[in-house]
Image (tube, helix red, strand yellow):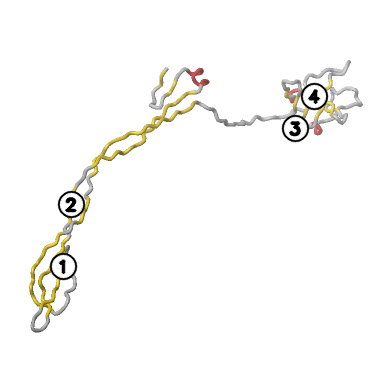
Amino acid sequence: MVQDMDGVRGTVLPPRPHAPSNAAQGVVQLESGQQVVVATAAFVPHPDGRYSLPLRLTALPPVDRGSGSDAGAPLVLPVMVEEPDVHTRRVETGTVRMTKRVQAREVLVDDPLWRDEGAITRVPVQRVVDGPIPVRVEGDTMMVSLLEEVLVVDKRRRLTEARHSRTPRGETHHPQPVTLRRDAARGERLNSPKEEGAMGWQRHSSGYMTR
């Protein structure tokens, strides 16, 4: 069985008895019954016994039945050229195992902490005023005036004292240990069984080769 580049099939006929043999060409009978002459160098054999042709069987010259022999048929020899057909495929060379561990370290944190404290100072005044005195703030001191009424020939207001309220700010330090964690990764290359059997060497992530 032979098949050309267009899928047309035919059968290679054995040499006819008492016909002059020509090893350079053969006869192929198509499924339509037509017989054509093909150069034997053009047949490409396959393991299952089939043949393929890199040409068209319908374009080849038919066998001359009038002469009773195909010895005078023209010899058709195809001209072929080989072209590279390059493919790539993925090959597993090994595996990598990643391990992670947590590292702990202690650092000293010393940030200032603020706290407000109140202190009251009594300031005697003892003077007469015309009316209430509003609260005043000077810096970190708030001054609140205390009034009382006293009997005089005419009723007047007398300032007895003023109380100054201050809120001084003090700074204290409370060092405390704080635990910080950091990840560290280590890579280990695990070669596949095929690669170990073929080469007998193992490559570690450090870059050294070991037997």
The residue beneath circle 1 is: 143
x and y, in percent, of residue 145 in the image: 15, 70
In front of the other: label 3 or label 4?
4
Of the two numbered discs 2 and 1 in the rendering, the one whose residue sits closer to the viewer: 1
Q: Quadrant of residue 109?
A: top left
Q: Nearer the viewer, mark 2 or mark 3?
A: 2
Of the two numbered discs 1 and 3 on the same chain, state the one appearing first in sequence: 3
Indicate the amino acid at tag 2: Glu
First of labels 4, 2 by sequence position: 4
Q: Looking at this view, name the residue that lies furthest to the top.
A: 18
Question: How many residues crowd mark 4 within 10 Å: few (<14), some (14–19), many (20+)?
Answer: some
Q: Amino acid at mark 1?
A: Met
> Number of callouts in the render?
4
Left or right side of 89 for 101: left
Residue topped by disc 2: 171
Q: What separation in Å lies between label 1 and label 4 (alpha carbons)?
A: 119 Å
N-term mark: 2 or 3: 3
Quadrant containing the C terminus is top left
Determine crowd level at label 2: few under 14, some 14-19, many 20+ residues with C-alpha closer than 10 A: few
| Mark in the foreground, 1 or 4 | 1
Q: SS at mark 4?
A: loop
Element class at badge 3: loop
Q: Is residue 124 above or below residue 70?
A: below
Q: Which mark is residue 5?
A: 3
Looking at the image, which is closer to me, 189 or 76?
189
Residue 19 drawn at (x, y percent)? 87, 18
- Proximity of marks 1 and 4: CB atoms separated by less than 8 Å: no
Gap in angstroms between the C-alphas marked 4 and 2: 103 Å
Mark 4 — residue? 1
